[in-house]
Amino acid sequence: MGEFKVHRVRFFDYMPSGIRALAFNRDTERLAVARDQGSLEIFNFSDNYCQEKIFPGRDGRSIEALCWVGTRLFSVGLDGLITEYDLENLRPKYAVEAYGGPVWSISCNLQGNLLAVGCEDGTVKIFEVLDDGIQFQRNLDRQKGRIISVSWHPSGTKIAAGMMDMVRVFDAETGRAALRLLVERGVGAAKNKEVVVWSLAFLSDNTIVSGDSAGKVQIWDGLMGTLVRSHFITKWDVLALSVASDESSLIAGTSEGLVVQFQFLQSSGEQQDRQWVRTRTFKNHSHDVHALVLTDTAVVSGGMDTQLVVRPLLDKVEKNTSESELRKIIFPLKSLVSCAKKAGLLLFQFPGHLEVWRLGESEGYGKDGDRLSVKRKPEKLIHLKRKGEDHISCSALSPCGTWLAYSTVSCVRLYRLQQSGNNISITKQPVHLLAPSEDGKWLATANTDNEVHVYNLKKLKLHCTVPVYDSSPTAIAIHPMSSNLVIGHADKQVFEYSLGQKEYTLTWSRKLQKQGLHPHWFERDTPISHISFNPQKPSHILLNDAYMLCIIDQSLPLPDHKTRLCNQNTLRGLPESERVQHSHAFKICKRFQDVLSVSFQEDESLVIVERPLLDILSQLPAPVRQKKFAT
């Protein structure tokens, strides 16, 4: 693999936003994730859980709940708006005022033609879903308190609504309240303390399941309005519920970070004698679990600690497969760091601003693992605030450090950096082209339809389109010397495409696909996030994900399936004469964790930007409860 002088960067104070809501489309296997800053993310579970799309946030935008209607996505928030999203252009398509104050919840009937939203003014409002939008239809009977949660019965004839101290069941056709279910305050609770019904599920057998702020999951008879059973699972709030598609199990998320599973099991030998029984408890979060989804094979959860956790149900998946791996998705797949390797500058992207830093300098060289003394500390040069209310969606810094560009959903801005000694000034320039490749000739783009296009910037026209592969591209880069395009995909495959010949390279890419990648390469649970090239060694390609760095040396043979993939330690123990026989193209390093960016400098040193998860958790509010040893 070779030795490199590494700039280990940990002064990027990036803070991911907490997860507020989840919605899963079982037909397309797409998961929508809403975060506290108003941003949205779409994950494709059928393509190795790839983060497929990101909708940047906006100042003042609030998302409290999400809902899929077929392939259309809706959200509601405390701004009182119902918003549908344009999934092609990655922006809100339109927003309709609910005229009920802040909107807390949204639910779609099974038929997919009606939406119910719960509002601050105590009304459940019904909207009809049309081809080109939504239209208000009617209000259900107004209640005294805000409507926190809503759920349709699968038949579409009834709606359950959760509020303070009670659950109301409405006739969806007449709008009249048919039942009132009073929620207990819990043992030892103050009489004047209200109980909030945070989440509801209305099952096909007319069972209603509620989760409330008194720590209870309660099972109700939705026909008679009686309490069947009450499960006290926490001293704190039960914030979220989710039911399996076959209604055989459900999960509940709490404010102490627990996810509790219930299953509908037989209590005796008779088939009709079945009841909801608590079976398992999962602890994958340190803080509140705000949102849950129960898929056919996994429990998906998210909350204040910013992590999206996919925990497989081991009785539903095959062991030792990709589906049986526990996944914790923390950072966005898109790059938040840009490196000007010729100028020694770094660009950090935040939702509301950009920062430009100059790398520090060290004295001399050392052995593997040595920490070198710092001669000059890193220095923050620019703090650039964005214009307008839209959050920054992407940004870039040119290799020479002279140009800086960023975009939002509404505009693209280009700036020129002028350096005089240790001072940098900034002036705005008009823009009509995006960032080119290093030689200024090519521009490669990848879209959410898995298409990769390459443009000739000197002729200002499309040069070629790479054959469409059925997995999403997660990283692309153009080699500065050979002009070959290297592409990494969500399923861990790597391709090299010749822009001159307009085909996959015969000497490497086709050979790699014929032989196949090493089986251990596919055991990684995070996709390639960045690709770069060693300026001093053209045959070296550097790939990285959040937990691994890999240098592919195209001058060496590919590893066969019997060879160890990570064999650097083995090679060090062999005599020099035997190393050549055991060496192969893949050189892997796992010394760094929570990696956001890896880049080569002109002097062949590496810049590695890390954002340790413990640093993120240390900036969150204290959890309501921390488990201590032997308690």
Image (cartoon, rainbow, N blue to C red):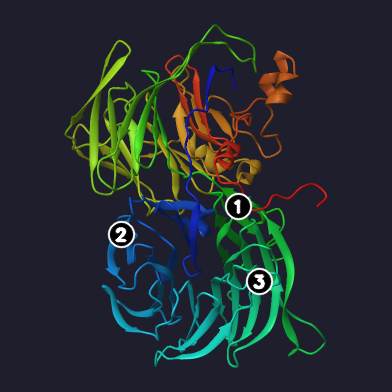
Residue 313 is situated, as x and y percent measured from the top left of the image, at 68, 62
Q: Quote the CA–CA distance across marks 1 and 3.
A: 18 Å
Quadrant housing residue 381 = top left
Residue 287 bears which disc, if any? Answer: 1
Amino acid type of the residue tagged 2 in the rendering: Pro
In the rendered structure, the answer to whether residue 581 lies left or right of residue 154 reads: right
Viewer-proximal residue among 447 and 412: 412
Give the spatial CA distance, label 1 vs label 2: 30 Å
Q: Nearer the viewer, residue 606 or 499?
A: 606
Q: Is residue 482 visible?
A: no
Which residue is depicted at the point 45% across and 76% down? 145
Q: Is residue 327 visible?
A: yes
Query: In the image shown, does 598 or 75 lie closer to the viewer?
Result: 75
In the rendered image, which quarter is residue 83 located in?
bottom left
The amino acid sitting under disc 3 is Lys
Please report whichever mark, 2 or 3, sits nearer to the chain's N-terminal start.
2
Of pointers 1 and 2, the one earlier in the residue sequence:
2
Q: Nearer the viewer, residue 620 or 428?
A: 620
Q: Secondary structure at mark 1?
A: loop
- Residue with the mark numbered 3: 216
Residue displayed at 44% across by 73% down: 146
How would you rate the neighbour count of disc 1 (Cα within 10 Å): few for under 14, some for 14-19, many for 20 or more? Answer: many
Residue under pointer 2 = 92
Q: Amino acid at mark 1?
A: His
Please state the horizontal and vertical placement of residue 190, each as a whole percent of the image: 63, 69
Q: Is residue 516 left or right of residue 173?
A: right
> Distance from label 2 to label 3 (Cα)?
36 Å
